[in-house]
Amino acid sequence: MNLRTWALCLLAAVTLLGLEAQEQEHSTAQPSQDRPTGTQENKPPTGEPAAPPNGAENPGMPDQVREMLRGFLALGAPPDPAAVARGQKTFVATCGFCHGTTATGGAQGPNLVRSTMVLHDQGTGKEIAAVIHNGRPEKGMPPFPNLGESQVHDIAQFLLGRTQAAANRMEYTIQNIVTGDPRVGQAYFQSHCAECHSPSGDLAHIATRFDPVALEGRFLYPANNPYGMFPPPDPRALKHVTVTLPSGKVFTGTLTHIDDFSVGLRDEGGEQRSWVYEDVPGIQVEVHDPLAQHLKLLRQYSDADMHNILAYLETLK
Ligand code: HEC
Ligand code: HEC
């Protein structure tokens, strides 16, 4: 496994287990005494191939027509919306790095919407449970032994929703995710998000830039860019690092890599520097991750919070 895959798995595991590893925005470490825990790299994923249009063409379709279409396309029963919402949350956080937040594939993992295994699963979780629990490590799919039966089932329901939406472009089942209360969402925003974002500033018209599914992916974990092959990294999402040498000399810049043995940065002048800890006993490394708060929030949201926040963000047209 290369470092990047390892880092992604680690991030997924951290999110999954709800560890408080990245609790603080700043994490300090002294590699000479201790391994620099809390400073693990997770490079912003390089994005994923452009998702196909989500088929919001006909949101106002009457229910009878919708049912007829379902019959015509031989789609099974629609997934349970609550399970889809839970499954989406787990999927975005745990699998989205590789398979894309909308499951249509990413730089590290295949499109699951077109997977025959997922199609056969039919939202039960029975077909996909083995690959989730055991992974296919030699092919780049890590095992997730800690995902319980109900979480696998929720993921399966989310994937069923995605395959049905893909099969039926006239319908837009995932549109149902905008069911929250925008006023409650606004209050949540004021207390949890307003320190960094403004509805009339950086998030103005955000709902016109992303469809609801992409927007949910965006606020759940903004390093995942649902569209665009290799989006230029947003400077506000880049990690910064301060390296203090035993001599007292301090270097700061954008983190370019970090692992158990070394750290690298690019300074303001664009110069690349790196250090091997072993060569510099007493070196201190401090990483600042602007998305740390997003990761923390991701573990706190209830289903209702997610729906309310999305409903509020949807008003920012
Ligand atoms: C580090 C990247 C990575 C992560 C994270 C990841 N996967 Fe995968 N996944 C892969 C790769 C690569 C494959 C293809 C393996 C192969 O070629 O057999 C795969 C294959 C699969 C398959 C089999 C598809 C098929 O048609 O054979 C399923 C289902 C799947 N992943 C689901 C998930 C789910 C659910 C999660 C989250 C719990 C997840 N994956 C997390 C990389 C990843
Ligand atoms: C500690 C600061 C901080 C907090 C708190 C925070 N965010 Fe963010 N957010 C960021 C950073 C940094 C980015 C990455 C830069 C970017 O992509 O715009 C980001 C990105 C986003 C984006 C993507 C914006 C875009 O243009 O694509 C959305 C949407 C978002 N955050 C919503 C929220 C919501 C909703 C909350 C509260 C529930 C929240 N954020 C809390 C710092 C924060």
Image (cartoon, helix red, strand yellow):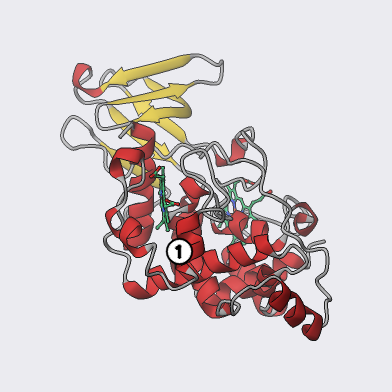
- Up the image or down, 317 lies above or below 249; here it is below
Q: In screen coordinates, is 26 left or right of 197?
A: left
Question: Along the line of sight, which residue is nearer the eye, 281 or 221?
Answer: 221
Residue at x 68%, y 78% (from the top left corner)? 179
Residue at the far left in the pictured view = 33
Counting from the top left corner in percent of width and height, residue 309 is at 64, 70
Residue at x 66%, y 60% (from the top left corner)? 166
- Up the image or down, 130 lies above or below 309; here it is above
Counting from the top left corner in percent of width and height, residue 274 is at 36, 18
Instruction: Answer with the quarter of the image where residue 63 lies.
Output: bottom right
The residue that label 1 is drawn on is 90
Q: Is mark 1 within 8 Å of ligand 1?
A: yes
Counting from the top left corner in percent of width and height, residue 236 is at 60, 40
- Up the image or down, 97 lies above or below 44; here it is below
Q: In screen coordinates, is 277 left or right of 242?
A: left
Q: Secondary structure at mark 1?
A: helix
Q: Identity of the amino acid at label 1? A: Thr
Residue at x 30%, y 35% (from the top left corner)? 1
Question: Along the line of sight, which residue is nearer the eye, 212 or 283?
Answer: 212
